[in-house]
């Protein structure tokens, strides 16, 4: 019951909430090669229900292209600046200090290795994506905010690489390289029975793509229930992608405010 009194318990709860809210309050060392967007992106993707307890976001180092940054192994909604770690392109932590690392960090290391244009990677298990990785129905763009998907979205089939001996996790460099080959030059690849990856030249663009890929998947599943679907033509996909690409800061500011309560 709440009688309006400020109890010790409520004070502690308030202070805990206060210290947890400004995720970006901890200083990032100058020249470290990453910025606030990495922590904010983790919080946004969790708040938008793209990531749950699993999945991850990384960014390539801005000072050393052979390194990237991501959190230690933990739920994305809880990531703070203190949890961010540096990795090389073989997936090794540069300064592990005993911290647990994600099993699937090879998704990130191998994509950065094969795609010099990519500076951010999201890997997620979002439920709305799963049907398009396990069925014969292709994921295709049908709304203007998802034109970046282009004409086709590739599917990574881990059985083609390792038969039925895997747990579907991309837990080594060989599997990561195979996923990167499936992704090719695309912005998104489905992972059969597992989830998807989205990549981009910046964290903000990558978060935008990760979110609107799911929005498109949800809309496509709904539209297919109604009957024949009109997808974007290749020309429409290209034009809408070009129009929306410079506008990602607008939803980013909204998502950030919703996730952190600050701008
Ligand atoms: Zn995964």
Image (tube, rainbow, N blue to C red):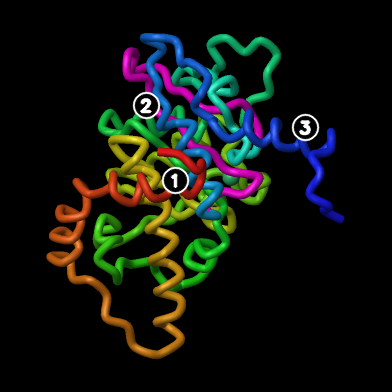
Q: Is residue 158 above or below residue 87?
A: below
Q: Quadrant of the C terminus?
A: top left
The answer to whether 91 appears left or right of 188 in the picture is right
Which residue occupies 51% across, 38% down? 42
Q: Which residue is mark 1?
A: 257
Residue 82: image quadrant is top right
User: Is ligand 1 closer than 8 angstroms to the Cβ of mark 3?
Assistant: no
Q: Which residues are magenta?
A: 50-74
Question: Of the numbered discs in the image, which one, if any, rests on residue 36?
Answer: none
Q: Quadrant of the N terminus?
A: bottom right
Mark 2: secondary structure: helix
Q: Nearer the viewer, mark 3 or mark 1?
A: 3
Q: Nearer the viewer, mark 1 or mark 2?
A: 1
Which residue occupies 54% across, 19% down? 85
Residue 13: image quadrant is top right
Question: Of the numbered discs in the image, which one, if any, rests on residue 12?
Answer: 3
**Crowding at label 2, few (<14), some or many (≥20) Cα neighbours within 10 Å?**
some
The answer to whether 228 appears left or right of 14 in the picture is left
The answer to whether 166 appears left or right of 71 in the picture is right
Which residue occupies 28% across, 36% down? 201
Residue that extends furthest to the bottom in the rendered view of this protein: 227
The answer to whether 9 appears left or right of 36 in the picture is right
Looking at the image, is mark 3 or mark 1 earlier in the sequence? 3
Q: Which residue is mark 2?
A: 113
């Amino acid at each position: 019951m709440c009688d309006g009194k400020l109890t010790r318990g409520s004070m502690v709860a308030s202070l805990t909430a206060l210290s947890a809210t400004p995720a970006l309050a901890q200083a990032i060392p100058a020249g470290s090669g990453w910025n606030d967007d990495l922590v904010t992106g983790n919080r946004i993707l969790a708040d938008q229900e793209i990531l749950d307890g699993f999945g991850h976001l990384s960014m390539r180092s801005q000072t050393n292209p052979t390194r990237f940054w991501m959190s230690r192994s933990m739920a994305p909604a809880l990531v703070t600046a203190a949890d961010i770690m540096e990795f090389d392109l073989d997936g090794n932590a540069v300064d592990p200090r005993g911290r647990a690392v994600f099993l699937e960090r090879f998704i990130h290391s191998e994509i950065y290795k094969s795609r010099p244009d990519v500076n951010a990677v999201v890997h997620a298990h979002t439920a709305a994506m799963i049907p398009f990785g396990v069925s014969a129905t292709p994921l295709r763009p049908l709304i203007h905010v998802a034109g970046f998907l282009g004409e086709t979205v590739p599917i990574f089939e881990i059985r083609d690489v390792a038969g039925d001996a895997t747990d579907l996790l991309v837990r080594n460099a060989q599997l990561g390289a195979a996923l990167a080959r499936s992704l090719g030059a695309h912005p998104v690849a489905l992972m059969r029975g597992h989830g998807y990856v989205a990549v981009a030249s910046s964290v903000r663009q990558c978060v935008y793509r990760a979110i609107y890929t799911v929005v498109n998947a949800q809309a496509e599943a709904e539209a297919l229930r109604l009957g024949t679907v009109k997808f974007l033509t290749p020309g429409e996909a290209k034009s809408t992608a070009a129009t929306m690409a410079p506008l990602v800061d607008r939803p980013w500011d909204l998502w950030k405010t919703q996730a952190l309560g600050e701008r």
